[in-house]
Amino acid sequence: MDPGLLNYLLFIFVLVGIYGLMSLGLNVQWGLAGLFNAGIAGFFAIGAYTSAILTSPEVAGRVGGFGLPILVGWAGAMILSVALAWPIGRVCLRLRSDYLAIATIGVAEIIRLVARSEDWLTGGVRGISGIPRPFGELSYLASQWAYLAIVLTVVVMAYLLIERQLNAPWGRMMRAIRDNEAAAAAMGKRVDKRRLEAFILGSALMGLAGALFVHFNRSITPEAIDPMIVTFLVWIMLILGGSGNNRGALLGALLIWLIWSMSELLTDLLPTEIAIQAKYARMFLIGLALQLVLRFRPEGILAERDPSTLRNEGPR
Amino acid sequence: MIRKRFAAALTATALLTIPPVSAQDEVRIGLLFGISGAISAMAPTMVDAARLAISQVNAQGGIGDGKTLVGTLGDSGCNPQNATDAATKAVNIDRAVAIVGPSCSGSVLAAAHSVTVPTGTTIISPSATSPELTRLNDRDRVFRTVPSDGYQGAALARALLERGIETVAVTYIANDYGAGLAESFRSEFEANGGTLAAYQSHDGSKASYRSELSRLARSGADTLMIFDYGDGSGLTILRQSLENGFFEQFVGADGMQSKALIRAIGAENLEGLLISAPIGAGAEALERFSQAFRAENGNPEGIFAATSYDATFLLALALEHADGDRNALPQSLRAVATAPGEPILPGEWEKAKQLIAAGEEIDYKGAAGDHEFDDAGDVPGAYALFKVTGNDFEIIAPID
């Protein structure tokens, strides 16, 4: 294969993996538990900045310089995301879903503004640089391969674990709560507690995605946690791919990134006079794809599997 | 079945869109600008300015023995996700030997860290002003034609101390422009004996700043430093301080040098306003660029238009000097941009080409400055103090 094309594909798949992880996290929250989290960027940011602060070298005027191993950074990213998700969940999950959306969007904005303005913690608008990358000292191609392997390992592990949860009693219970809360409660299920679990699990995955992202780029600035490029893109991925279906979540991430990135190669063939306008075509294409899917296949490309086919014992 | 067909379609798309391995008769450079995102309003002018440089190069003999210089346009957005994507495509798919851009500082940091430095690609940004780039461990692959915010703040601090202004209150807009200026101002001002009575940031989108201003005024300083934009919240702050008589004198940086300010407040009320702003080193160089750009329906006063032009022209000169060796580009950039050498002005491609062929030293004097790169690939920039006279800004004195 042509080395340039290979490098490009490696890059794309690393980002697909990172966004796929967020999409899986959102699937646990929305697809499985029906929780409308509109603050994905907030959890992504917490993960990214936590891991960055824990692992980066010391800089005057900013907390940090711990220089801890990268795995500690990733664990810290997940722990802090959970620590943030827990109080939000405690307060908001009893509200109906649209209130949760408002609350999470607010929290994400607060986090973004803190990241922008608190120099001592996040480096403010200049962000944090010099973050280590695993196998980053290898040659370009080899380090891209290595990072892709890491990301894929994480995504596959997350996928398998969630699939397992989904088919376990926990998953069936979550669906019962999502589809008929009153009935589930009447059967003695603790609705609040289960929802909180799903919310925390999804948030931890989003935090981990942030950590993976920050070590890939070796730097983080507040521009990276813009809701446009995180929250809404991940939502589109999940809705397009099929919410409630983990494979759908991953497929959505893949499709959106391919449209986002590769359509630029197509629009480059247009005449140079409209080259600037043509750059907006990819946003249009993503909007169009979403519209078409919602119109003709509202359940997403890969629909949620019928629970009755998941069961392999007991009477029908 | 559907999936198979889908995969086939995807593969076909991928194959169709990969351009043929770069032809022998052209040299490709990437033009990465923030076409979408926070600075999308400035991008079209920047792109046009870069294209002007490319068309001048091609009209006057091209690169080497008549190779065409081709700029492949990419959208680096104003965020790391788009920037790394665009840079990866420029390097791997478009096979650009070097890149002009990306636009925003965060984009440059991410693209440099994860794409261009590891692949040994030289980049030269016309608009990234964060001092963070100076400290970047870039193996000498990252340059810029716009001065770091660090220079202007420090220059302004020295100028104020020289004029006997020793106590000021500072307010700056909370973004990388405002924070960069304020921080470099503070360290230089305090190191040379100045006193900051107050130092705070403000959000750029509020309707009123009276509470912030009254707090600043209570600090006792007579002079307010406003690191902000004169057509945005900087205007509001200035107007409200004048209305309430909070301060006697105001000092701003280049962002405040906006005619909207004079129109809205009136020149007669702005006698106490001092502004520092970059000045092009050579009036002739700027004039040559302005004429050529106006002829192409461009706006030479557009923000970063001159720096975008200079970045592209400098890169072309370096490509000519390096004779196609991408690893020699950093040394070549320094060779063509810095003294000594025969001065080259914007558009003088043919003359530069002959001199390079003859093995002579050249020194590009750009529309936005002389571009004497330092060790970090930064340009110092030349600044002057301005005051309001009539309906325009007038230079009082250059700043050392």
Image (spheres, coloured by chain):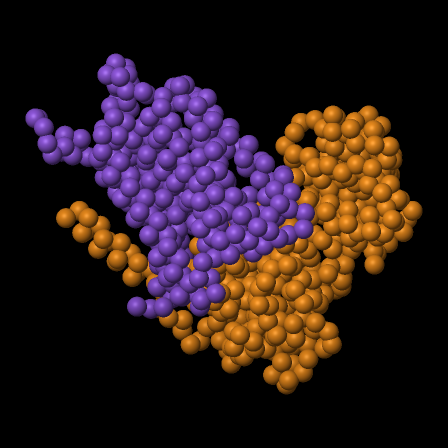
Chain colours: A purple, B orange
Q: Quadrant of residue B383?
A: bottom right
Q: Is residue A187 left or right of residue A70?
A: left
Image quarter hosting the C terminus of chain B: bottom right
Residue B325 rendering spot, x and y as whole percentages: 52, 77
Q: Is residue A159 left or right of residue B248?
A: left
Question: Is residue A35 positioned above or below A56 on the image?
Answer: above
Q: Report if residue A138 is visible in the image.
A: yes
| Total marks placed | 0
Name the residue furthest bottom: B358
Report the residue that reaches farthest toward the left: A315
Q: Is residue B42 left or right of residue A277?
A: right
Name the spot of residue B256 as percent of width and height, x first. Answer: 74, 42
Query: Who's the residue at 60% across and 40% down the image?
Result: A116
Q: Residue B19, how many percent across, how many down?
A: 36, 65
Viewer-proximal residue among A112 and B230: A112
Instruction: Give the camera-side residue of B264 and B124.
Output: B124
Residue nearest the observer in this picture, B94 or B50: B94
Extreme residue toward the right, this view:
B164
Instruction: Give the camera-side residue of B199 and B271.
Output: B199
Q: Quadrant of residue A232?
A: top left
Q: Position of residue A54 (x, y in %)?
A: 53, 48
Q: Residue at x 36, y 24 (%)?
A: A193
